[in-house]
Amino acid sequence: MLFFTRWKVAAILLMAFFVCLCAVPNFFSESTVKRWPEWAQRHVVLGLDLQGGSHLLLQVDANAVRKERLQQLADDVLRVLRQARIQFTGRAIVGNGVQVHITRDSDVDTALAKLRELSTPLSGILGTSGQRSVDVAANGNVITLTPGDAALTERIRQAVDQSIQIIERRVNELGLVEPTIQREGIDRILVQVPGLQDPSRLKEILGKTAKLDFRMVDQSMPAEQAVETRPPPDSEILDGEGNQKYLIEKRVLVSGADLTDAQPGFDQRTSEPVVNFRFNSTGARKFAEATQANVGKPFAIVLDNKVISAPVIREPILGGAGQISGRFTVEQANDLAILLRAGALPAPLTIIEERTVGPGLGQDSITAGEHAAYAGAALVIIFMFATYGLFGLFANIAVAVNIAMIFGVLSLLSATLTLPGIAGIVLTVGIAVDSNVLIYERIREEVRAGRSAINAIDAGFSRALATILDSNITTFIAAAVLFYIGTGPVRGFAVTLGIGILTSLFTAFTLTRLIVAYWVRMWRPRTVPI
Amino acid sequence: MRLLRIVPDNTRFDFMRFRRISFPVSALLSIAAIALYFFHGLNFGIDFVGGTLIEVQTKAGPADLAKMRATIGGLKLGDFQLQEFGAPNDVLIRISEQPGGDEAQQAAVQKVRDALGDEVDYRRVEVVGPSVSTELLAYGTIGLVLAIGAILIYLWFRFEWQFALGAMIANVHDLVLTVGFMSLTHIDFDLTSIAALLTILGYSLNDTVVIYDRIREMLRRYKRMSMPDLLNVSINATLSRSIVTHLTVAISLLALLLFGGQAIHSFTATMMFGVVLVGTYTSVFIASPILIYLGVGSGRMEGGAEEPEPPPAATAVAPPQRSRARR
């Protein structure tokens, strides 16, 4: 156990040295490290609980996605049946599907064939998966179209992808530094912004769908009457500012998707804050046609199903540019411009988890973690030295190398260090010495059993190592499970605990052994000083 | 230099005698812990029941809890608690989950922010909606079960099934007692508590495995020693290690407890209880003697009356072939 070939010694020392070296960037400031070559820049990232910042978990409203898909399917059914000149009644969304009643029995087969064209095969990883986007089934004259679960999941996935892009644009527009935006599971998005102390504005910006439509006001009846009776089938009642109700046509003249630019500004006459916008060429053409046809009538600017304003068209607007005014404050106008530039979210987002840590607490936690680490390390080092003397010193060297290696590995992985993570490192100091304790106690036993010094050391190592491996694997399993189920700070604990176990195994199996072997070779001891 | 000997050499303490006491005591304590869990309950944190947690620090002087309580009470947000947190100007506000889904929680935070205004610094705001809290609880439970299962399988492969089962009974007993402790002290039970429980599981098993390793070695070496004697020898042989290691872990935890700050206080307190107090006791007084009841070495003589050459405890007689120098 005490013999090492030369290349093995070199390999052990190089490995330890290299891993420790990886920890170096952490001791320099961000700006210094930035000037180093790319490969040398990897360093430990402080978790939000240490550097302060906001963690928001958003969920895409899957129900809204489903509803929109059904509405779209219902529209498709209408279009297809009309094109095929098939008479039908009772087209409606029922539960998770769209139902339609075909009037004439003879049309049912044609209708089925035509409607089946709406259903496309879903492609799986290996060619077609056998599933289709819509199930079409007939029961007598009633045809039911149901979107498949896989197709819906795919839609939600797409909605999340789009949302991530839009959130990125919105967050960047707010000028926040180094945000992380990533998908979590199927329908969730994690937004982390370091240094953000009050996420109110961010939440407001993220909470808006920003779906902007230009539509006509339905003047066939007053809005009040429509509220009391029933709105015409192609119109709906929308809220405006205050308690005002509007009766608005469902048909969209131009949508926010056709905007190319939006900027906050001030109205030249009233000097109210407004948002100036510009359409792309399609939008400009549509808007020009619509305004030409409707001079003298009011139209509505609808944002997230709320009427912002409903001005009367005085003259055709041909230039493709316009202005939205709606009693905004400067900040509201600013935010609206940001939202319009970034585009609309495909579905509403809900904040389902928020964790914000202020910079004060973060700094306090770093200080507390440092103090605990120093105190813990100092006490353990003294204790080990008092118990095992020279060998305790060897163990302490191993512990020091261990901590350096943990930071090295954390840097290599660009892992996040959290306060529980620091706790994990402090605990690792406890485990790292355990390996040495096991070895030394075994050596003590072997000495008592009457072995010579070198024999006892040799036997102590060879017997203790099996035990060390067995006992550490159980803790490692616990750490692995914790990593798998944990989030944020808890995961940080699992990471440092797991890495700590690995590095302490490494030092116990190689470094401590190497040190002791050299000591034995140099001094040829007759007794073991432990 | 005289080195510290915490456990004197050649200790021969008869641990097995205590199994007639330790088993009933542990059973009673476990029942008490389970009763505490059901009748006293755990102080579930917002991770698992949803709700809002806000830590504020007053800018001028110590916090006026009564005034703050009145302000927040006026917002009609249902159940809430105020608590001084570490320092007199540091206050922890806990608001129970609002009816009305995820948006309602956000609205509640905004109300509190508006009401307290600029008089305080917001050190921490945590809002967990109902959809996340149910999930976290499920994950936490699954994680614990998964970890126990994985470790059980590992031990089954490494040892015989009796050892795996014995270790598991012993360490589930640790977890039960720790949960009882958390119930009694009303420590927040949140995600970090699950982390603490898993770590306790890992550490206690670590300790148990070290003793089991020795028991296995002894079983192979002394074919005729009676089981209680063999267990006693094994425990005595590893006693010094157990105590030194637990002292170092206790030292590390003590440092965290004293200097690690309020944020991980309940985490370290739980670990201290679980690893240092319960874990050590369990490996010696439960995990080892339970092997007798599980039938390990049942073919051996009970009592060791006719052991031909009872080797002294804490003496590892090495078979000669192992000591051969390697090259």
Image (cartoon, coloured by chain):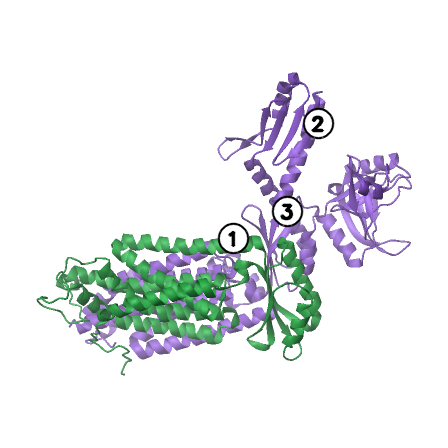
Q: Is residue A524 above or below residue A136?
A: below
> Which chain contains the residue that carries disc 3?
A
Q: Is residue B27 above or below residue A251?
A: below
- SS label for mark 1: helix
Taking A302 as reference, is B103 left or right?
left
Residue at image position (61%, 29%) is A144
> Which chain contains the residue that carries disc 2?
A
Q: Nearer the viewer, residue B295 or A519?
A: B295
Same-chain status of marks 3 and 1: no
Please name the amino acid that badge 1 sits on: Glu
- SS label for mark 3: helix
Please name the amino acid that badge 2 sits on: Arg
Please name the amino acid that badge 3 sits on: Ser
Badge 1 density bin: few <14, some 14–19, many ≥20, Cα 10 Å: few
Q: Quadrant of residue A273?
A: bottom right
- Extreme bottom residue here? B1
Chain corresponding to green in the figure:
B
Give the residue number, with chain letter if any, for mark 3. A163
Task: Indicate the position of residue B91 as horizontal and vertical percent values.
Answer: 60, 72
- SS label for mark 2: helix
Task: Indicate the position of residue A504 as horizontal and vertical percent values.
Answer: 36, 64
Image quadrant occupied by the C terminus of chain B = bottom left
In this view, the mark in front (2 or 1): 1
Task: Indicate the position of residue B43 as horizontal and vertical percent values.
Answer: 50, 65
Q: Earlier in the sequence, mark 3 or mark 2?
A: 2
Badge 2 density bin: few <14, some 14–19, many ≥20, Cα 10 Å: few
Chain corresponding to purple in the figure:
A
Give the residue number, with chain letter if any, for mark 1. B135
Q: Nearer the viewer, residue B131 or B309?
A: B131
